[in-house]
Image (cartoon, grey):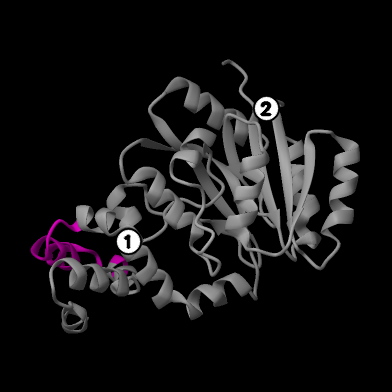
Amino acid sequence: MNNPLVSIIVPCYNQAQYLDQALQSVLNQTYDNWECIIVNDGSPDNTKEITHKWIVTDNRFVYLYQENSGVSSARNLGIAFSTGTFILPLDADDKISPDYVALAVESFQAEKSLKVVYCKAEKFGDEVGMWNLPSFTLKELSLDNVIFCTAMFRKEDWKLVGGYDNRMVSGWEDWEFWIALLKDGGKVKCLETVGFYYRIKDISRQKQMIYDNMKHLLEYLSVKHADFFVAQYGSFIHLNNIIKQTQKEKFYKLRSKKFVVDVFCKTFFGFSIFGIYKKDL
């Protein structure tokens, strides 16, 4: 398939003021075989009215509505409705570069074993500059989400893992999805070009929700994907060595994930390691 259809999924809740910029970045794509499905997640703002003008402008834009159910549900609805071979989620307040879709599709066609293609990213809005994430490895993925949500994957793979977890309404649904998608294998490629622009806002409801629910989210992840976390750390001894060998700035990131480690250690090894974290700090 030389020109596969790409479905770009844009959930929107209280982001109507940014939606034009996101959709303009879709319209600017050099790759023209795409559809863009905007999912109004019960938003009380003027999302419907803004979307209407884009549908009139180009019939590749599609509008869906659901009662407010969260970003996972909105993405799943859009993907289920889509007809593309490849899926690219895009939040309504972010943007993509004109060549991102073309380069991602080209990568998939060149290497059949790829499961995810993403790119370099820049921040804009209340903070500017490169968004420097660690290079992907399964080990890095076990410590934190190193792939932002706007990465391309196959619709068939989305089906195989059951989509985004609708229960994760407080955040980190993309991290959970990448774990589910990649823990049993598959290659990941990061394009050597900036293709994604991540809006930074001074007040972020999503960030506050994640902070408030961090313990619950980490415990949920550690139980649902206990096989993944145990596979990465192998044993308590191996885990302790990783902690001691990790650079200080990375260790602070690991400390924020101590609930994950603690839960699966108690589950599989029968004891807590909170004391180790406190001693090493």
Label 1: few (<14), some (14–19) or many (≥20) C-alpha neighbours in 10 Å: many
Confirm whether the magenta stretch covers residue 240: yes
Q: CA distance from mark 2 to mark 1?
A: 34 Å
Residue in the image at 15% along x and 68% along y: 244
Kind of residue at disc 2? Tyr
Q: Tell me which secondary structure the magenta stretch mostly adopts.
A: helix
- Residue type at tag 1: Leu
Residue 220 position in % (x across, y down): 38, 68
Residue labelled with disc 2? 31
Residue situated furthest top in the rendering: 2
Task: Measuring from the top left, give residue 16's x and y in whole percent.
Answer: 79, 60
Foreground pick, 201 / 127: 201
In the picture, the quarter occupied by the N terminus is top right
- Compared across the picture, whether 180 is left or right of 80 comes to left
Q: Is residue 97 visible?
A: no
Regarding residue 111, the answer to whether it shows in the image is yes
Within the magenta stretch, is there residue 230? Answer: no
Give the percent coordinates (x, y) of residue 61: 79, 39
Q: Is residue 6 left or right of residue 243?
A: right
Q: Which numbered marker is on residue 143?
A: 1
Residue 202 image position (x, y, % from top left): 65, 74
The quadrant holding residue 40 is bottom right
Circles 2 and 1: CB distance less than 8 Å?
A: no
Q: What numbered label is drawn on residue 225?
A: none
Q: Is residue 214 left or right of residue 100?
A: left
- Compared with 161, 244 (above or below) is below
Q: Earlier in the sequence, mark 2 or mark 1?
A: 2
Nearest the eye: 35 or 136: 35
Quadrant where the image shows the C terminus: bottom left
Task: Give the secondary structure at mark 1.
Answer: helix
Q: Residues within 10 Å of mark 2 (few under 14, many from 20)?
A: some
* Magenta region: 233-250
